[in-house]
Image (cartoon, rainbow, N blue to C red):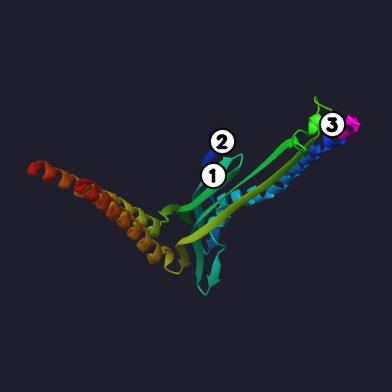
Amino acid sequence: VSDETTKPAAQPAIDLTAALAQGSEQLNPVAERIFAAAQPGAVYSPPVQSGNYTVITASQVMSGGGFGSGMGFGPTRPGGAEETGAAATPAQAGGGGMGGGGGASGRPVAVIVIGPEGVQIKPIVDPTQIALAGITAWATMAGMFLRMRRRRRD
Amino acid sequence: MAGMIQIRAVAGEAVTVGDVTVTPCSHALVVRLPIGGFVWNQPTNVLIARGDRTERRPVFDVTMAAGLAALVIGILAGLIVRGARTRREEALA
């Protein structure tokens, strides 16, 4: 009886590994999509023509992602092996899972204008981002000074 | 480690308008890890070819430069004020 209990229980370990390997293979195209941001086509837009002018937009592109998987095995229930009498090969069950996440962002940096006047590279200024960077930097400094002042008073 | 972190100089598809050929170039930082990865691609310059003459013009990221400048000025201002306070306290003591 104990042999019958242990034999089918060993099967899920193999299936689980195969399932995780299959899952990893399915994630490969996702990883390739992340690394596709390294191509120049991701940074420079296709040229747009309007009258005598051709415009190309240059953008800064960032993308990243990560994924992981895990699995574990254990006895079907605490003390299960002793109950069945199969101390050497206890009945096992397993579980596993995988997940991942990622994101991408792009910001226009400049516009390349090809026209009758020649080639012009016009920078794109994002005042919101500059203001946010400035406010964050100065707020951090202000917070640091306040903390220093408090410490000296104490 | 070198295979995991790469800095690539990549040239895009050249665009020809009349007698001007524009080739956009960028620098890509690629970090490949067994559990994922990261890519930062930044336009760097544009190659402008007209006849026999080739010119390289930089693509300047004003927003990033201004953000970095704000950060550096903030840090410098903090260090200067801290130094001035320390000196004043030492003089008073």
Looking at the image, which residue is at 33% across and 60% down? A135
Query: Is disc 3 placed on a helix, strand or loop?
Result: helix
Which residue lies under the disc numbered 2?
B3
Point out the residue furthest to the left here.
Answer: B92
Mark 2: few, some, or many residues within 10 Å (few <14, many ≥20)? few
Q: Position of residue B78 (x, y in %)?
A: 25, 50
Is B84 on the left-hand or right-hand side of B22? left
Which residue lies under the disc numbered 3?
A84
Which residue lies under the disc numbered 1?
B30
- Whether residue A134 is situated above or below residue A147 in the rendered picture: below
Point out the residue furthest to the bottom here.
Answer: A51
Q: Chain of mark 1?
A: B
- What's the distance in space between the residues labelled 2 and 1, CA to CA? 10 Å
- What's the distance in space between the residues labelled 3 and 2, CA to CA? 52 Å
Q: Quadrant of residue A91?
A: top right
**Res. A126 in view:** no
Q: Label 3 amino acid? A: Thr
| Mark closer to the observer (3, 1) | 3
Quadrant (top left, top right, bottom left, bottom right) of the C terminus of chain B: top left
Query: Is disc 1 placed on a helix, strand or loop?
Result: strand
Same chain letter for marks 3 and 2: no
Mark 3: few, some, or many residues within 10 Å (few <14, many ≥20)? some
Pick the front one: B29 or A150:
A150
Looking at the image, which residue is at 31% across and 57% down? A139
Q: Position of residue A153 (x, y in %)?
A: 19, 48
Magenta residues, start to end? A1-7
- Whether residue A42 is situated above or below residue B2 in the rendered picture: below
Query: Is disc 2 placed on a helix, strand or loop?
Result: loop
